[in-house]
C-alpha cells in the first residue's frame, strides 16, 4: 500500500513577520535571517529524496522553495498551487499584532482571552478574533480555510499516490496559519500555542485516504 509522506514547510521570516504585522495575501521578501534559516532547513532536508514539490503562489513561499530545491536536483520545478496560499485576513491585512491584542483586551478582558488561548480550542479562538475584528467581513473563516487546505493536500496526495509504484516524499512549501489549520483538525492538542515557526517542517503521512500526523514544528538547529 502506497504512503505519501508530506513534508509541510512554513516559509522563512519576512519583513512583515519581523515588523509583527499580519501577513496573509499581502506579501514581502524574506529577511536575511529568513534566508539563513531557509538555508539551514535546506541542509536539514538534504538527505531526503523528494519525488515532487508544491508551493504557494505567494512570493515568500516560492523564495523559500527555491532555497530548499537548490540542494535537490531531483526536483525540476515545483508546482505552484493557489490552494496553498495563506489565510486571508481581509481588512486586517498588514495590521500590527499589538493592535489585535489591545482590541481583544478591551472586548473580552485579558484574563478571558488568555484562558481561551490556553484551551484546546485556542486556534479556533484566534481565527474567531480575526473574523470579529475585520469590519470588511472578508477574512476567511476557520471552516473555510480548513476545507481549502484539506481539499488541496488531499488532491495532491491522491494524484501522487495514483502515479506511485511505492512510497513518495513530497515537499509542500506554504504558510503558518493555513498549515496550522490543517494540523489543528488532525491533532488539536499537538498544535503549538504560538503555532508553527518560520522554516519549520511538519510531516503528515497519507495512506488509503487517511492522514496521520508524524512530526510537527521541527526546525533546523543553528550552528554553534
Image: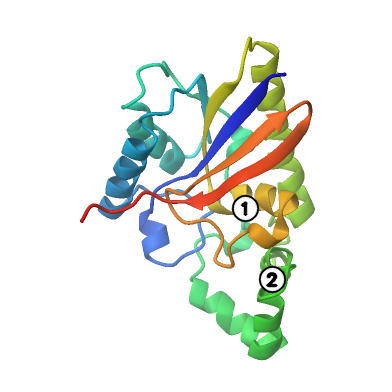
Residue 70 horizontal/vertical position (percent):
31, 27
User: Which quadrant, please, contains the N terminus?
Assistant: top right
Residue 76 falls in which quadrant of the image?
top left
Front one among 182 and 164: 164
Front one among 39 and 109: 39
Q: Is residue 17 left or right of residue 167?
A: left
Q: Is residue 84 above or below residue 156?
A: below
Residue 112 falls in which quadrant of the image?
bottom right
Indicate the secondary structure of the residue bearing disc 2. Answer: helix
Residue 13 horizontal/vertical position (percent):
38, 53
Other residues around mark 2 within 10 Å, as few (<14) / some (14–19) / many (≥20) = some
Q: Is residue 173 left or right of residue 167?
A: left
User: Which quadrant, please, contains the C terminus?
Assistant: bottom left
Q: Which residue is mark 2?
A: 129
Q: Residue at x 72, y 28 (%)?
A: 207
Q: Residue at x 62, y 58 (%)?
A: 89
Name of the residue lying farthest toward the front: 1
Amino acid at each position: 500500500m502506497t504512503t505519501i509522506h508530506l513534508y509541510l514547510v512554513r516559509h522563512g521570516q519576512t519583513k512583515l513577520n519581523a515588523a509583527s504585522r499580519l501577513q496573509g495575501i499581502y506579501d514581502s521578501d524574506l529577511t536575511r535571517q529568513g534566508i539563513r534559516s531557509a538555508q539551514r532547513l535546506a541542509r536539514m532536508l538534504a538527505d531526503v529524496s523528494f519525488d515532487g514539490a508544491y508551493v504557494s503562489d505567494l512570493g515568500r513561499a516560492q523564495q523559500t522553495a527555491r532555497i530548499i530545491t537548490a540542494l535537490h536536483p531531483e526536483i525540476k520545478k515545483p508546482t505552484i498551487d493557489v490552494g496553498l496560499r495563506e489565510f486571508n485576513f481581509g481588512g486586517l491585512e498588514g495590521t500590527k499584532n499589538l493592535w489585535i491584542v489591545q482590541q481583544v483586551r478591551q472586548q473580552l478582558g485579558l484574563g478571558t482571552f488568555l484562558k481561551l488561548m490556553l484551551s484546546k480550542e485556542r486556534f479556533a479562538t484566534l481565527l474567531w478574533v480575526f473574523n470579529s475584528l475585520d469590519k470588511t467581513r472578508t477574512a476567511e473563516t476557520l471552516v473555510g480555510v480548513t476545507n481549502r487546505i484539506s481539499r488541496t493536500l488531499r488532491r495532491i496526495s491522491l494524484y501522487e499516490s495514483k502515479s506511485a509504484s511505492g512510497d513518495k516524499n513530497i515537499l509542500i512549501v506554504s504558510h503558518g496559519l493555513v498549515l496550522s489549520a490543517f494540523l489543528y483538525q488532525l491533532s488539536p492538542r499537538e498544535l503549538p500555542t504560538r503555532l508553527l515557526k518560520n522554516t519549520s517542517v511538519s510531516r503528515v503521512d497519507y495512506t488509503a485516504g487517511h492522514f496521520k500526523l508524524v512530526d510537527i514544528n521541527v526546525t533546523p538547529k543553528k550552528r554553534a
